Image (tube, rainbow, N blue to C red):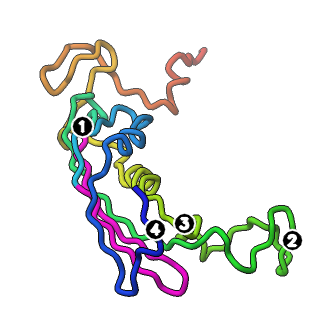
């Protein structure tokens, strides 16, 4: 999905487009069992101000995710909202890579003000990479099927939410595990 900058009028541009499932699946391919069920359309607003393009977007991805403790599939509705400042890659006052600029900094150096800036070719804004990146940033690091999920037995693998397995599991503080075999001589 691409938007031509020349299509963005003074009043802005609002779009609502379906997101190709391949775009989101590409983002999720290395995300430990996250599976796309469906996604809501991408709603995105563009504004041009002083040669910069401001992009605000939102969508929701319906995912199936394994529980962090017991590995049961969990349905997750993940809202994604983003706000970006886009600037042309051809920026005035920037020297070529490898040269020192006027301030004595190496070309390609990074300023704090540039942290929220995305670069584009000056003519078109590709939304697919933005959607992929924003979905990955919005994903939770751990999803539980329930707050009190007991997980799997570390010895036999039994789901402890369904029934107790009877294995003797002693919680050993790993910091003190080396002392387990320590014997004092008298």
Q: Nearer the viewer, residue 115 or 180?
A: 115
- Distance of mark 4 from mark 2, alpha carbons? 33 Å
The residue that disc 1 covers is: 64
Counting from the top left corner in percent of width and height, residue 76 is at 22, 45
Indicate the quadrant containing the N terminus: top left, top right, bottom left or bottom right: bottom left
- Distance of mark 4 from mark 3, alpha carbons? 16 Å
Q: Earlier in the sequence, mark 4 or mark 2?
A: 4
Counting from the top left corner in percent of width and height, residue 45 is at 34, 73
The numbered mark at residue 100 is 2
Counting from the top left corner in percent of width and height, residue 181 is at 53, 16
Q: Earlier in the sequence, mark 4 or mark 3?
A: 4
Q: Residues within 10 Å of mark 2 (few under 14, many from 20)?
A: some
The numbered mark at residue 4 is 4
- Distance of mark 3 from mark 2, alpha carbons? 23 Å
- Distance of mark 1 from mark 2, alpha carbons? 49 Å
**Badge 4 element:** strand
- Distance of mark 3 from mark 1, alpha carbons? 30 Å
Q: Residues within 10 Å of mark 4 (few under 14, many from 20)?
A: few
**102 with respect to 24 (left or right):** right
Q: Earlier in the sequence, mark 1 or mark 2?
A: 1
Q: Nearer the viewer, mark 3 or mark 1?
A: 3
Residue 111 in which image quadrant: bottom right
Q: Are marks 3 and 2 in contact (CB under 8 Å)?
A: no
Is 73 covered by the magenta stretch?
no
Q: Residue at x 50, y 65 (%)?
A: 124
């Amino acid at each position: 999905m691409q938007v031509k900058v020349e299509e963005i009028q003074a009043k802005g541009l609002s779009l609502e487009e379906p997101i190709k499932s391949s775009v989101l699946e590409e983002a999720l391919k290395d995300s430990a069992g996250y599976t796309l069920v469906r996604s809501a359309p991408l709603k995105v607003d563009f504004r041009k101000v002083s040669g910069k393009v401001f992009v605000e977007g939102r969508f929701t991805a319906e995912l199936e995710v394994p529980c962090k403790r017991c590995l049961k599939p969990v349905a997750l509705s993940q809202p994604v909202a983003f706000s970006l400042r886009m600037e042309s890659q051809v920026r005035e006052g920037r020297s070529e890579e490898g040269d020192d600029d006027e301030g004595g900094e190496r070309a390609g150096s990074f300023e704090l003000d540039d942290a929220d800036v995305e670069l584009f070719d000056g003519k078109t804004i590709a939304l697919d990479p933005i959607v992929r990146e924003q979905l990955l940033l919005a994903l939770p690091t751990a999803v539980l099927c329930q707050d009190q999920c007991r997980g799997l037995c570390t010895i036999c693998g039994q789901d402890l939410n369904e029934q107790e397995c009877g294995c003797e599991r002693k919680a050993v503080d790993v910091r003190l595990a080396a002392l387990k075999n320590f014997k004092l001589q008298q």
